[in-house]
C-alpha cells in the first residue's frame, strides 16, 4: 500500500512540476523604455526650479492671476449659489438636489463610447 501511495505522490508532483514550468516572460513581456535616461532626467529639471517648486520660498501660484470680475460680483454669485453649494456638500452629496430638478438639455454626467463628458 505504501508503494502505491509513493507512486501516486510522485506522479502528482511530476504533473505539478510540468504545469508550473511555463515561462514567466511568455505572458509578461519585459518593459523596454523608448526614452533615454537623459530625456527622463530632463523632464524633472523644470519641476525643481524655484518658479514651479511649491517648497520654494519664492513660489507664488497667484503671480499671474488676472480677473475681470470685481469683489461685489463674486460675492453676489456666491450668495446666489449658496443653496446649491449646501445641497452638494450635504449628507447625500447632492443626490436629492439633482433628482428634484429637471435635467438640462444636453447635460451629460457619464460618458459612453460615443459621447464626451460635459461635467
Image (tube, grey):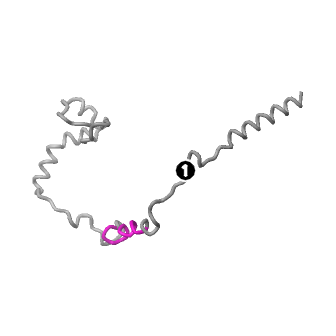
* Residue at left offset 46%, top offset 66%: 36
| Residue sitting nearer the eye, 3 or 36 | 36
Tell me residue 70's x, y (percent). 10, 57
Residue that label 1 marks = 29
Q: Is residue 37 magenta?
A: no
Q: Left or right: 59 with respect to 44?
A: left
Placement of the C terminus among the 4 image quadrants: top left
Tell me residue 88's x, y (percent). 26, 40
Q: Left or right: 37 with respect to 74?
A: right
| Residue sitting nearer the eye, 26 or 69 | 26
Q: In this picture, is 45 found above or below 6?
A: below
* Residue at left offset 19%, top offset 63%: 65
Q: Left or right: 43 with respect to 80?
A: right
Tell me residue 15's x, y (percent). 73, 36
| Residue sitting nearer the eye, 105 or 12 | 12
Q: In this picture, is 28 found above or below 109?
A: below
Residue 97 is drawn in which quadrant? Answer: top left
Q: Is residue 50 magenta?
A: yes
Near mark 1 (Cα within 10 A), the count class, few <14, some 14-19 or many ≥20, is: few
Tell me residue 29's x, y (percent). 55, 50
| Residue sitting nearer the eye, 39 or 105 | 39
* Residue at left offset 27%, top offset 40%: 116
Residue 52 is drawn in which quadrant? Answer: bottom left
Placement of the N terminus among the 4 image quadrants: top right
Q: In terms of secondary structure, where does tag 1 sit?
A: loop
| Span of residues in magenta | 41-52
* Residue at left offset 14%, top offset 43%: 80
Amino acid at each position: 500500500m505504501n508503494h502505491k501511495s509513493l507512486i501516486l505522490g510522485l506522479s502528482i508532483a511530476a504533473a505539478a512540476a510540468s504545469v508550473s514550468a511555463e515561462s514567466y516572460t511568455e505572458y509578461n513581456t519585459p518593459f523596454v523604455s523608448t526614452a533615454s535616461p537623459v530625456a527622463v532626467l530632463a523632464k524633472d529639471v523644470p519641476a525643481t526650479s524655484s518658479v514651479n517648486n511649491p517648497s520654494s520660498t519664492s513660489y507664488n501660484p497667484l503671480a499671474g492671476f488676472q480677473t475681470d470680475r470685481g469683489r461685489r460680483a463674486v460675492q453676489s454669485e456666491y450668495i446666489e449659489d449658496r443653496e446649491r453649494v449646501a445641497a452638494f456638500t450635504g449628507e447625500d452629496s447632492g443626490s436629492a438636489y439633482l433628482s428634484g430638478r429637471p435635467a438640462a438639455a444636453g447635460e451629460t454626467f457619464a460618458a459612453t463610447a460615443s459621447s464626451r463628458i460635459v461635467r
